[in-house]
Image (cartoon, grey):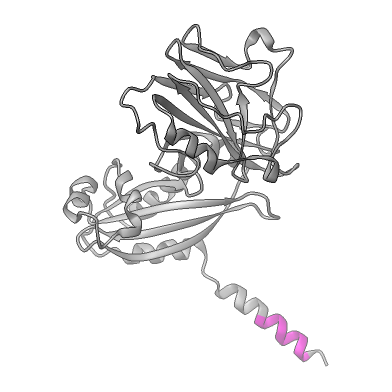
Amino acid sequence: MYLPKYLLAVIVLFIASCAPTNQQKTAGLVDLVKPGETVAVTAIYDETSGAVTALGNRWRDEIEAALSRQHIIVKARRDLGFIIDDNDSFGSKVDEQKIWQTAGADLIINGSYRLQPNVASPHALLTLKLLDTKTANVRQTLNLTKKLTPGWAKSAAQVSGNVFQESVEILVDSSNSKKKPPLSARLNRQPACFPTAAAGIVLVQTEPGTHVYLLNLAADQSVTLLHPNSRLPDQKLISGHFEFPPPALSKEIQLVFYPLIDGQMSHESIKVISSYFPIDFSYLPVPENAIYAGVKGGDIKQVLKSLKQAQGWSEQVLDYWVGPECQ
């Protein structure tokens, strides 16, 4: 009577033990490197936003260390962003000679990750591709699951660059005018990881006489307008420095961060736009004393249309995380 149960337990344990570990999968990738071949590892970026983060760099370090332990020559890190951009057409349209000269290696390991923070066991889905620079072929693709350890959110919020040139989150720059205002913007918290209900400040440096717009892109891709608003109308800057909320109105206006779903982590961004001319964003809702998302939020496609019709503007995207991991 107990034999079926015993056999079932044995089968379950056997199947579980046969599943390859991340270390075994990585070792399999290393085994595909032939004697004498050199390897370069690109930045491992967030495939949702394109951000190059400290979290991705941590995994990049692990891969380089695994290669070095096997006495494989790892080339110095270089700017391999174009390879990431052309990855989908690798083997058909890319210039193999250009790749070889830029990478300085026989093989390139290209990586990206997708975070899954709001599950019982928070983890990241890591995709690695082994690219052959001589033949322009993808030699192997690996999918790994990496456990998110304490402090991951701050590492994910520590951004050093972005591999995307055009996307929904990072709209194309003004193409109707060659002259664009200079723009530098940042959030007051670095890394940009905000606990639930924390207040923040957007610091902007641009050209006097320009118009500044702040748009919040929520985790569900809906858009709201932070500035201008009912208290701060659209007008030209007197100086090139803009702070939101303004210190003089700190008791009246606060920029407070909340995740899309209470108790979970959200990855969002603020789009800062500086323009020589007014841009009409009046169709976007202003989140005054309420969270606007989903059907209540604005349409990113309409924002893109407005920007394509405008002239003389610059933009910068400030990524941030918000939720219980940001303590």
Q: Quadrant of the N terminus?
A: bottom right
Residue 53, given in percent of the width and then of the height, sits at 47, 39
Residue at the image point whose x is 62% and y is 43% from the top: 219
Residue 286 position within the rendered picture, expressed as x and y whole percent measured from the top left: 67, 29
Question: Residue placed at 19% from the left, 56% from the top?
Answer: 96
Q: Quadrant of the C terminus?
A: top right
What secondary structure is the stretch in magenta mostly built from? helix
186 vs 7, nearest the viewer: 186
User: Can residue 4 be found in the magenta stretch?
Assistant: yes
Please state the total of marks drawn on the protein image.
0
Asked if residue 82 lies left or right of residue 97, the reply is: right
Is residue 114 toward the left or the right of residue 252 in the image? left
Residue 302 in picture, x, y percent from top left: 54, 40
The front one of 301 and 108 is: 301
Q: Which residues are magenta?
A: 3-11
Residue at figure coordinates x 32%, y 22% from the top left: 179
Does the image show residue 160?
no
> Residue 195: percent from the left, percent from the top?
69, 32
The single residue placed furthest to the right in the displayed view is 1
- Considering depth in this image, is 124 or 259 the residue closer to the camera? 259
Asked whether residue 228 is drawn in magenta, I would say no
Q: Is residue 158 above or below residue 97?
A: above
